[in-house]
Image (cartoon, rainbow, N blue to C red):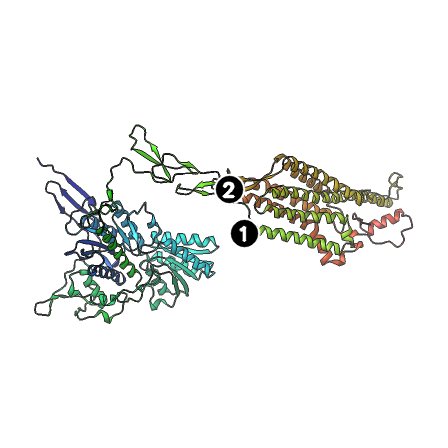
């Protein structure tokens, strides 16, 4: 009994039946693919896939009918020149005595129609040898297929390379530049003769930066070529501050609404630079619509797929294309290629694509047959395999000459992709030549063997293993209950590597190193600290130096006007102490920047704590005086009110009320010396805390490797957190005491109320440091240091502005107000020797304002 096996596969309406009993392939359905073929007498075949047409014709098929392969329309002269470049290269190789001297190459070229579905159809035909969809065996005779050149655009090549890669079938791209195709894991058998878009995207970004353009729009094709290319471009330009005005995507299938939307976005944008990652075929509908509606001139930055395209560079588009700038593939000249292009004639072939080319080139309909035996032409209508109507009603004469016309087919001034096709064919030819000249014992396969140049598989190294070898970056994982030849490959953990095949264990990296992305080697961790030369460090340095300079300028103004009443009021020496301490706090902020060292870790916090303590102690001395004067002024005001009320009522004041006059109540026993003693006492306590901290638990510079795996953070170990908190806590205590005293004196009836401004300064100080704590605890590394510096600068600027800005305004801008009468609010009396009476006291209350501001002697 014969074994009978029947295999049925249904794919796009194509049905193939394979019978092992009959050992024949029976074709039930097929694809409709335009092709050019020359395989007779050839030893090997090289395939080619080109977008000879622009698109497929939409078919509104019924669900009850079997699906059919769509037809193509829109002849592409440029791509047809690429086709001719492939045949030119193959004929040149066949004549050569240096490359494959005893081997004849043939070709089979399919039209992708610039659509993925047609490209996949052609791929399946290459793999099976038939116009059907059975890729697990090949049912064809003749010469074997060695490699495929194609399939054109990146999206087409990605689709076909996924299928070819399953069989490790060689595919050579001549224009597919998408960076995704560099992934050998996804596309193990894809090669190309053009650079990856990684280089082009970065080059276009550098071009934008070089010209100083910071406001650009982007447009990308709706495929992997456009998406990956424009994604990398935007990542590169956004790093250097370039802003994207708009980012649009061209529709893969023509949509008038989608095109109109993009036109509206372009016209509504103020960007004069538009970057486009697309093919000329995808871009042409947008350019046509822009030309129809009109648009102001803009400069277009083009990818290599359309920068030299004649489809875009048309005279009717020049009025709104302000210029096209971009990178192109390498240009080259092919000897006698123009002659080769011009010798094409329909009477020398039976290929329908050549007839169609002729009709579109000369706008006529081909009705001529092959040359007759009498020397003339036999006239007969051309039998067309598709339903597309003729180009023109005018018949072709056959006497037309390609040398008389000028289109993208005959234009050889910019052979770029054409030259890339030429190189692709030679790449396959040289690979086959190396295969043909291989010697047994030195070959690349098992035991140094070579492959047969006529009968070879695309991959050629048979294997019989339970598990494939584990690559570097992975380790073997044992499968329980299975032989040792069977194992799993497990990725190394972060911070571990293997740099050999089939490693059993991963090796941990040392403390200062971390594993790379592939887990194949240990790389030095990134070093992080707030450096002087980075943008953040420079900004903080500028703010620090600027603050110190402003403080120094205030000090100079005080020195130059040291004898004026406003400067002398409330102890000018304390004012100089406050100014000096603010300069110290600004200087301490500089020490926070830079690589932490032992001395800087000890200095920066100590200097900051002492600086704030000196400032707040001096402010406290001023605030206590202001508070006492305010209280005395309040008591004097009440006494005057009682005296005035008694006089009006005609009553006699009691002796108890007249024990002290209002003037005596206003006098404060606290002198300038006492103020300085208060400031010194406040400072001494902080000096003791800081000294204890630096002696017992001094801060040190450390390398923090625990916070982040991939970084080493240089920072300061503060030694004793308790003493550090005690130091800053003491500063907050001084600030609180200053705030209370100043708050009491805030309503003093002076012409210049210093208590009010001290109150504002203390409020700013508290707000800054209260908000600093959560911000500081939520950050790490250099940003933690930056947060502390911001707090130092904000509090220092706040104290400087609130306490000294009002005084400097009067001293420098309104010097007429800097007099004793205006500052103190007292008018001079004519006779100070007579003792005051109740009448004079009441008169003084009515006509003058009591001052709470004393002047230094």
Q: 99 and 381: which one is in front? A: 99
**Count of numbered marks:** 2
In the image, is residue 617 above or below residue 269?
above
Residue at the disc numbered 2 = 712
The picture quadrant where one finds residue 388 is bottom left
Alpha-carbon neighbours of circle 2 within 10 Å: few (<14), some, or many (≥20)? Answer: many
Percent across and percent down for residue 623 are: 74, 44
Tell me the distance, in whole angstroms, between the alpha carbons under discs 2 and 1.
Answer: 20 Å
- Quadrant in which the N terminus appears: top left
* Residue at image coords 25%, 67%: 338
| Image coords of residue 441 (percent x, y) | 23, 45
Instruction: Work out whether mark 2 precedes mark 1 in sequence or the reverse, and give the earlier one.
Output: 1
Residue at 72 percent across and 58 percent down: it is 812
Q: Residue 775: in sight, yes or no?
A: yes
Mark number, residue 535 = 1
- Foreground pick, 519 / 570: 519
Which type of secondary structure does the marked residue at label 2 adopt? Answer: strand
Q: Are marks 2 and 1 in contact (CB under 8 Å)?
A: no
Q: Residue furthest top?
A: 481
Q: Residue furthest right?
A: 834
């Amino acid at each position: 009994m014969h074994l009978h096996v029947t295999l049925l596969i249904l794919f796009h309406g194509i049905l193939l039946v394979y019978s092992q009993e009959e050992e024949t392939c029976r074709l039930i359905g097929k694809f409709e693919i335009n092709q050019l073929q020359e395989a007779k007498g050839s030893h090997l075949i090289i395939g080619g896939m080109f977008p000879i047409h622009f698109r497929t014709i939409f078919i509104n098929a019924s669900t009850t009918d079997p699906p059919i392969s769509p037809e193509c329309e829109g002849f592409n002269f440029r791509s047809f020149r690429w086709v001719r470049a492939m045949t030119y290269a193959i004929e040149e190789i066949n004549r050569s005595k240096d490359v494959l001297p005893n081997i004849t190459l043939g070709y089979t070229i399919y039209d992708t129609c610039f659509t993925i579905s047609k490209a996949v159809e052609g791929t399946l035909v290459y793999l099976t040898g038939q116009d059907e969809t059975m890729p697990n065996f090949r049912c064809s005779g003749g010469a074997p297929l060695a490699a495929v050149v194609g399939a054109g655009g990146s999206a087409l090549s990605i689709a076909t390379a996924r299928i070819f890669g399953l069989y490790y079938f060689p595919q050579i791209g001549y224009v597919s530049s998408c960076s995704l195709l560099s992934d050998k894991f996804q596309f193990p058998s894809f090669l190309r003769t053009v650079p990856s878009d990684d280089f082009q995207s970065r080059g276009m970004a550098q071009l934008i930066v070089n010209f100083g353009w910071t406001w650009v729009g982007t447009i990308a094709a709706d495929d992997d070529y456009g998406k990956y290319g424009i994604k990398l471009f935007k990542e590169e330009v956004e790093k250097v501050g370039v802003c994207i005005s708009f980012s649009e995507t061209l529709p893969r299938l023509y949509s008038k609404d989608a095109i109109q939307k993009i036109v509206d976005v372009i016209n509504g944008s103020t960007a004069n630079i538009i970057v486009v990652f697309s093919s000329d075929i995808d871009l042409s509908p947008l350019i046509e619509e822009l030309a129809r509606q009109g648009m102001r001139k803009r400069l277009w930055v083009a990818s290599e797929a359309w920068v030299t395209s004649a489809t875009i560079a048309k005279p009717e588009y020049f009025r709104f294309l302000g210029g096209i700038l971009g990178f192109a593939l390498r240009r080259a000249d092919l000897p006698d290629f123009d002659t080769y292009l011009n010798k094409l004639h329909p009477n020398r072939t039976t290929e329908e694509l050549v007839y169609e080319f002729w009709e579109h080139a000369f706008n006529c309909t081909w009705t001529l047959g092959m040359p007759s035996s009498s020397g003339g032409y036999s006239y007969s209508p051309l039998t067309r395999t598709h339903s597309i109507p003729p180009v023109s009603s005018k018949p072709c004469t056959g006497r037309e000459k390609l040398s008389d016309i000028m289109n993208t087919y005959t234009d050889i001034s910019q052979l770029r992709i054409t030259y890339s096709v030429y190189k692709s064919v030679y790449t396959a030819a040289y690979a086959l030549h190396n295969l043909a000249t291989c010697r047994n014992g030195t070959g690349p396969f098992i035991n140094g063997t070579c492959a047969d140049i006529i009968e070879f598989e695309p991959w050629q190294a048979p294997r019989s293993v339970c598990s494939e070898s584990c690559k570097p970056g992975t380790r073997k994982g044992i499968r329980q209950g299975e032989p040792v030849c069977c194992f799993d490959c497990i990725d190394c953990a972060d911070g571990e590597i293997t740099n050999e095949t089939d490693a059993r264990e991963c090796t941990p990296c040392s403390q200062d190193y971390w594993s790379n992305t592939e887990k194949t080697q240990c790389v030095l961790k990134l070093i992080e600290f707030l450096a002087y030369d980075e943008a953040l460090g420079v900004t903080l340095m500028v703010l620090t130096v600027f603050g110190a300079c402003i403080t120094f300028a205030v000090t100079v103004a005080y020195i130059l006007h040291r004898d004026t009443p406003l400067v002398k009021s409330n102890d000018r020496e304390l004012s100089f102490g406050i100014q000096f301490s603010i300069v110290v706090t600004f200087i301490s902020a500089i020490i926070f920047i830079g690589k932490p060292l032992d001395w800087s870790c000890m200095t920066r916090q100590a200097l900051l704590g002492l600086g704030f303590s000196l400032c707040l102690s001096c402010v406290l001395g001023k605030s206590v005086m202001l508070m006492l004067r305010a209280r005395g002024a309040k008591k004097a005001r009440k006494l005057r009110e009682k005296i005035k009320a008694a006089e009006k009522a005609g009553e006699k004041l009691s002796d108890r009320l007249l024990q002290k006059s209002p003037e005596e109540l206003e006098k404060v026993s606290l002198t300038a010396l006492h103020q300085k003693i208060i400031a010194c006492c406040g400072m001494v306590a902080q000096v003791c805390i800081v000294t204890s901290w630096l002696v017992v638990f001094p801060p040190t510079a450390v390398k923090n490797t625990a916070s982040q795996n991939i970084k080493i953070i240089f920072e300061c170990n503060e030694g004793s957190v308790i003493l550090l908190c005690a130091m800053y806590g003491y500063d907050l205590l001084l600030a609180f005491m200053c705030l209370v005293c100043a708050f009491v004196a805030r309503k003093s009836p002076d012409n210049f109320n210093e208590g009010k401004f001290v109150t504002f300064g203390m409020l700013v100080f508290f707000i800054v440091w209260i908000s600093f704590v959560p911000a500081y605890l939520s950050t790490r590394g250099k940003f933690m240091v930056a947060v502390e510096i911001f707090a130092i600068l904000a509090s220092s600027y706040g104290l400087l502005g609130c306490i000294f800005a009002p005084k400097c305004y009067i001293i420098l801008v309104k010097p007429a107000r800097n007099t004793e009468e205006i500052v103190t609010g007292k008018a001079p009396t004519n006779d100070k020797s007579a003792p005051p009476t109740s009448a004079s006291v009441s008169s003084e209350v009515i006509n003058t304002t009591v001052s709470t501001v004393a002047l230094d002697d």
